[in-house]
Image (tube, rainbow, N blue to C red):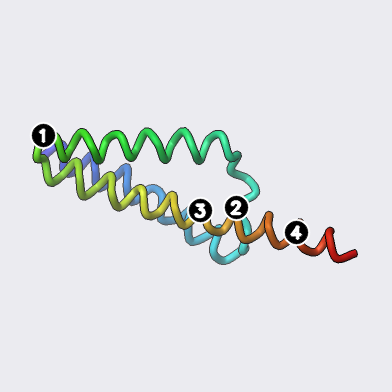
Amino acid sequence: MIGSLAGLLTTACWLPQVLRCLQRRSARDFSWVYLVALGLGVLAWVLYGIARTDPVIITTNATTLVLISVLVAVKLRTELGKSLVSASE
């Protein structure tokens, strides 16, 4: 029960960040080092959950990984868009 609550809270805390980035169409406030380190850490938790066959660890961290992936996609789109604009000028 405690693990489920902890997983729910730590996963849900990403929703406001993701929604804000989608609304602003920018994730420039997040550094690449942070996103990569966090993504790899959360992926490690997913793998750990799989090794332990723990559905709470797997589900909450897989969901967090999806949310982080959205941030990465927004950041990539923003930065690639800027570099394409700069190259065409």
Q: Which residue is mark 3?
A: 71
Q: Are marks 2 and 3 in contact (CB under 8 Å)?
A: yes
Q: Residue at x 56, y 58 (%)?
A: 74
Distance in Å between CA atoms under marks 2 and 3: 6 Å
Q: Which residue is mark 1?
A: 52
- N-term mark: 2 or 3: 2
**Mark 3 belongs to which amino acid?**
Leu
Can you say whether 80 is above or below 65 in the image?
below
Horizontal side, residue 58 vs residue 76: left or right = left
Which mark is nearer the camera, 1 or 3? 1
Give the camera-side residue of 48 and 20: 48
Q: Secondary structure at mark 4?
A: helix
Distance in Å between CA atoms under marks 3 and 4: 17 Å
Distance in Å between CA atoms under marks 4 and 2: 13 Å
Q: Are marks 3 and 4 in contact (CB under 8 Å)?
A: no
Q: Secondary structure at mark 3?
A: helix
Distance in Å between CA atoms under marks 1 and 2: 34 Å
- N-term mark: 1 or 4: 1
Q: Which residue is mark 2?
A: 27
Can you say whether 79 is above or below 58 in the image?
below
**Mark 1 belongs to which amino acid?**
Arg
- N-term mark: 4 or 2: 2
Circle number at residue 82: 4
